[in-house]
Amino acid sequence: MNKDLFSDAKIIQSWCKNAMPWTVAVREKQIESRKQITDQAIIDAIFSCSPGSVLDIGCGEGWLVRELAANNINAVGVDVVPTLIEEAKCAGGGDFRAMSYEEIASGKLGVSVDAIVCNFSLLGKESVEGVFRAAPSLLNRHGSFIVQTLHPVIACSDLPYRQGWREGSWTGFSTDFSDPPPWYFRTLESWIKLFVDNGFRLREMREPVHQKTQKPASVIFIGGLG
Ligand SMILES: C[S@@+](CC[C@H](N)C(=O)[O-])C[C@H]1O[C@@H](n2cnc3c(N)ncnc32)[C@H](O)[C@@H]1O
């Protein structure tokens, strides 16, 4: 395995390159599965926890923070890519900070919220483990940790169903995208283990189904403290 191609650092490098096409794709609603299912699915999952405050980790250009603000929920958005944070700040709706998962893991964030949400933003290996380790210290008592990600059974393709680095792809995205980020594939079992090993109880798992394909468009985990 080529360590330079498959690493948390490479993920960041690639997102820095693709910040503008990503902003356009999200704002112009170019991603079909988001428009049809997963945007509403994550909003419903957050509302089901009735949080007064939310931390959006890996917030991208900030659409979810703006959506929550429109529903009177205070949210802080954090992302490592400065261009995405600038775009988020320009569009407004919340408190946006440029910070990496590694910095969050080292205790740099200093917030306390009712819910943490990660919407398709937990892509790496050590960086994601760091976010899970830090999560309990960022949550109020009875706080919720909500993660939406690709459904492992669907995203596995023909490769063996076991965790490990995978090559990225921008198939289905515009030609403005380049240098796809690698990602660390996790099985359902390994996602659940991340919650449990870091002091969370898995309160709920949702599998939003795509109307057209009748297959899960994603999986949503809702973990709780205590
Ligand atoms: C697929 S995008 C999702 C963005 C947003 N959550 C959304 O729903 O549109 C993944 C995001 O994770 C962020 N990210 C990946 N690794 C990161 C890291 N180590 N530290 C901070 N942000 C990271 C990227 O910059 C990118 O904005």
Image: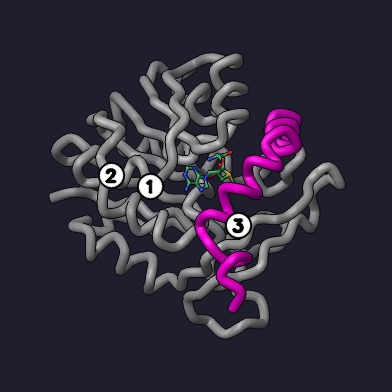
Residue span colored magenta: 1-29
Q: Crowdedness of circle 3 by 10 Å Cα count: few (<14), some, many (20+)? A: many
- What's the mark number on residue 217? 3
- The mark nearer the N terminus, 1 or 3, is 1
The reply to whether callout 1 and callout 2 are in contact (CB within 8 Å) is yes
Rendered position, 192 above or below 139: below
Q: Is residue 175 visible?
A: yes
Q: Name the image quarter holding residue 61.
A: top right
Q: Label 1 vs label 3: CA separation?
A: 29 Å
The reply to whether callout 1 and callout 3 are in contact (CB within 8 Å) is no
Towards the viewer: 91 or 167:
167
Classify mark 3: helix, strand or loop.
Answer: loop
Q: Position of residue 140 (x, y in %)?
A: 18, 35
Give the main secondary structure of the magenta stretch: helix
Task: Indicate left or right for 193 with 119 as reference.
Answer: left
The residue sitting at 40% across, 41% down in the picture is: 117
Towards the viewer: 40 or 111:
111
Q: Position of residue 94 (x, y in %)?
A: 45, 18
Q: Inspect the magenta stretch and tell me whether residue 67 lies in it.
A: no
Q: Label 1 vs label 2: CA separation?
A: 6 Å
Does any atom of ligand 1 lie closer than 8 Å to the CB of label 1? yes
Classify mark 2: helix, strand or loop.
Answer: loop
What kind of residue is marked 2? Ser
Rendered position, 157 above or below 111: below
Rendered position, 148 above or below 125: above
Q: Name the image quarter holding residue 169.
A: bottom right
The residue sitting at 39% across, 24% down in the picture is: 75
Residue named by callout 2? 106
The residue sitting at 68% across, 49% down in the picture is: 33
